[in-house]
């Protein structure tokens, strides 16, 4: 199986490269393939003829996108459109990673977003990612759009940040009124692999770890697993004002993809596995001594 992976140096792409290491991989970053350049994309895809294109390239700087929406639009919308056009020409399947930010995040926290719910992004990042989804849907039929949220893995991420703060401070303040599902890149990659193996119907799917929490409770769980003695104080979103509004509700229903027989671990099990695998606890203990 020949797979083209764009944005191959990113956190998710690293996990995908490891998962599919026994396949024929074509790994590109912007230096090898500029997805905003339609001619280059079409020529590259025609030359290499991958069966699957996994698009991990994205403009993910949520706050910076508010000031540079034009660049975010090129990467998050024009890029996927070009990949869709190229993929269709050679009859390959496009796998695209999207986000909870395509919704407003204002749904009552007792409810969850389903794939068919009306999208209404309130940030530049969300708008550009939605445009990317729409561009794919308008230009081809053989696609998987996987919406995810609260992603962490091999790179800079929330878990590592909180671990670092936990060893440096006696207490930390963490937002307690934003709800969602932490998602381990290893598990999102497993979902992608299972979707390919099972040949599930094409379309849009929500793909986060099972269960829901808040950033506050997520942090407490991290410290519990790691054995870090640091007080966690709950605060409101209003106390952490940022250029781009963060969604109060990022809870994505997984019912659709679970019905296809896809296995997804809980967020609690996933973060424990991540911390143990990365040996963060051991590193922290050595540094603390």
Image (cartoon, rainbow, N blue to C red):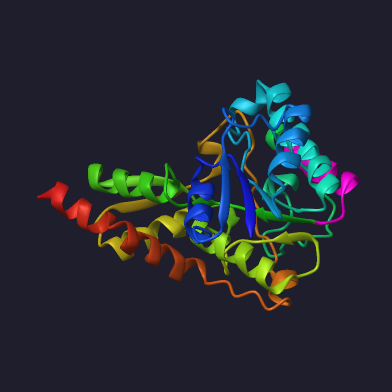
Residue 108 appears in the rendering = yes
Q: Quadrant of residue 104?
A: top right
Q: Position of residue 172 (x, y in %)?
A: 35, 45
Left or right placement of residue 97 versus residue 210 in this view:
right
Most foreground residue, 65 or 232: 65
Q: What kind of secondary structure does the magenta stretch mostly adopt?
A: helix
Q: Position of residue 62 (x, y in %)?
A: 61, 34
> Range of the magenta residues?
126-142
Q: Position of residue 165 (x, y in %)?
A: 31, 43
Q: Quadrant of residue 86?
A: top right
- Residue 265's place in the image compared with 140, above or below, is below
**Is residue 118 rendered magenta in the image?**
no
Left or right placement of residue 61 versus residue 99 in this view:
left
> Which residue is at 68% across, 67% downward?
195
Residue extending furthest toward the front = 47
Most foreground residue, 216 or 153: 153
């Amino acid at each position: 199986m020949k797979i083209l992976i764009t944005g191959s140096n990113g956190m998710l792409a690293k996990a995908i490269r490891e998962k599919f290491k026994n396949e024929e991989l074509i790994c590109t970053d912007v230096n090898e393939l500029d997805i905003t350049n339609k001619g280059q994309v079409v020529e590259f895809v025609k030359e290499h003829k991958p069966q699957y294109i996994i698009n991990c390239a994205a403009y993910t700087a949520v706050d910076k996108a508010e000031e540079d929406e034009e660049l975010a639009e090129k990467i998050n919308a024009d890029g996927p459109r070009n990949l869709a056009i190229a993929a269709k020409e050679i009859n390959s399947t496009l796998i695209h990673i999207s986000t909870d930010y395509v919704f407003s995040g204002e749904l009552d926290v007792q409810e969850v977003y389903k794939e068919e719910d009306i999208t209404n992004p309130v940030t530049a990042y969300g708008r550009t990612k939605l445009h990317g989804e729409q561009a794919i849907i308008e230009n081809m039929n053989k696609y998987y759009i996987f919406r995810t949220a609260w992603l962490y893995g091999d790179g800079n991420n929330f878990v590592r940040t909180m671990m670092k703060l936990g060893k440096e401070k006696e207490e930390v303040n963490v937002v307690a009124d934003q709800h969602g599902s932490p998602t381990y890149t290893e598990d999102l990659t497993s979902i992608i692999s299972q979707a390919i193996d099972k040949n599930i119907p094409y379309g849009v799917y929500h793909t986060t770890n099972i269960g829901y929490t808040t950033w506050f409770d997520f942090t407490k769980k991290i410290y519990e697993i790691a054995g870090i003695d640091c007080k966690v104080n709950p605060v409101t979103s209003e106390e952490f004002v940022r250029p781009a509004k963060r969604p109060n509700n990022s809870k994505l229903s997984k019912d659709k993809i679970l019905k296809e027989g896809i296995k997804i671990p809980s967020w609690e099990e996933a973060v424990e596995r991540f911390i143990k695998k990365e040996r963060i606890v051991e590193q922290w203990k050595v540094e603390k001594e």
